[in-house]
């Protein structure tokens, strides 16, 4: 019997659209843990935020991280809470919310939750 796929929230879909405009870097872990490999790469390459890092653990597993002004986060967290990151807000503002989220039909509850955290952009 096939497993049902979990529905992705509209908020996460909106975050995926925002993160699509962020530069992505691919690296291997080597002998380090994925988060350590990501931190070392950021330091060695002198990466500026925002950036996405795809860290390949082995042939089957890849960990995704988001490098933002507040530190290193999982990419999934950044997708779900994209409105908490000022550098991502700049991307949304430059493209325009209407264009960025067109067709997503975010409900009033989604916008209320986003506006609740508006202080993060001050």
Image: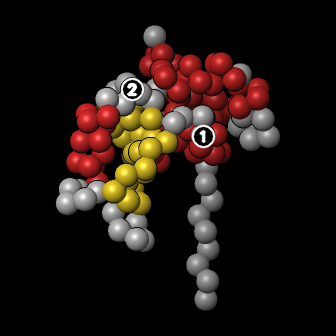
Is 66 located above or below residue 118 in the figure? Answer: below
Closer to the camera in the image, 25 or 80: 25
Which residue: 63% across, 25% down?
A: 92
**What SS does tag 1 mark?**
loop
Closer to the eye: label 2 or 1: 2
Label 2 packing within 10 angstroms: few (<14), some (14-19), many (20+): few
Query: Looking at this rendering, what residue extends furthest in the left direction?
Result: 31
In this view of the protein, which residue sits in the foreground, 85 or 118?
85
Residue ID at (44%, 19%): 120
Which of the two labelled residues, at mark 2 and mark 1, occupies the earlier sequence position?
A: 1
Q: Residue at x 49, y 23 (%)?
A: 87
Residue 10 or residue 71, whichever sits in front = 71
Observer-nearest of 2 and 71:
71
Q: Quarter of the image for the N terminus: give it.
A: bottom right
The residue most toward the front is: 45
Q: Is residue 117 visible?
A: no
Q: Position of residue 31 (x, y in %)?
A: 20, 60
Residue indicated by mark 1: 20
Numbered tag placed on residue 86 in the rendering: none
Please give the name of the residue rendered at 36% of the width and 40% of the height, measured from the top-left corner. Answer: 73
- Direction from residue 25 to residue 12 in the image, left or right: right
Residue farthest bottom in this picture: 1
Q: Residues within 10 Å of mark 1 (few under 14, many from 20)?
A: few
CA gap, disc 2 to disc 1? Answer: 17 Å
In the picture, measured across the screen, residue 101 lies left or right of residue 28, that is right
Image quadrant in which you'd find residue 30? bottom left
Does residue 75 appear in the picture of this structure? yes
Q: Which mark is residue 48?
A: 2
Q: Position of residue 44 (x, y in %)?
A: 26, 36
Position of residue 44 in the picture relative to residue 105 (left or right): left
Q: Secondary structure at mark 2?
A: loop
């Amino acid at each position: 019997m096939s497993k049902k796929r979990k529905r992705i929230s509209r908020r996460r879909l909106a975050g995926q659209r925002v993160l699509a405009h962020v530069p992505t870097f691919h690296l291997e872990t080597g002998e380090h843990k994925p988060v350590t490999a990501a931190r070392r790469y950021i330091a060695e390459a002198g990466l500026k935020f925002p950036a996405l890092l795809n860290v390949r653990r082995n042939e089957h597993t890849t960990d995704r991280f988001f490098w933002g002004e507040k530190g290193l986060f999982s990419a999934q967290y950044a997708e779900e809470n994209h409105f908490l990151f000022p550098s991502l807000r700049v991307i949304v503002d430059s493209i325009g919310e209407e264009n960025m989220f067109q067709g997503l039909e975010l409900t009033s509850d989604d916008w209320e939750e986003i506006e609740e955290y508006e202080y993060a952009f001050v």
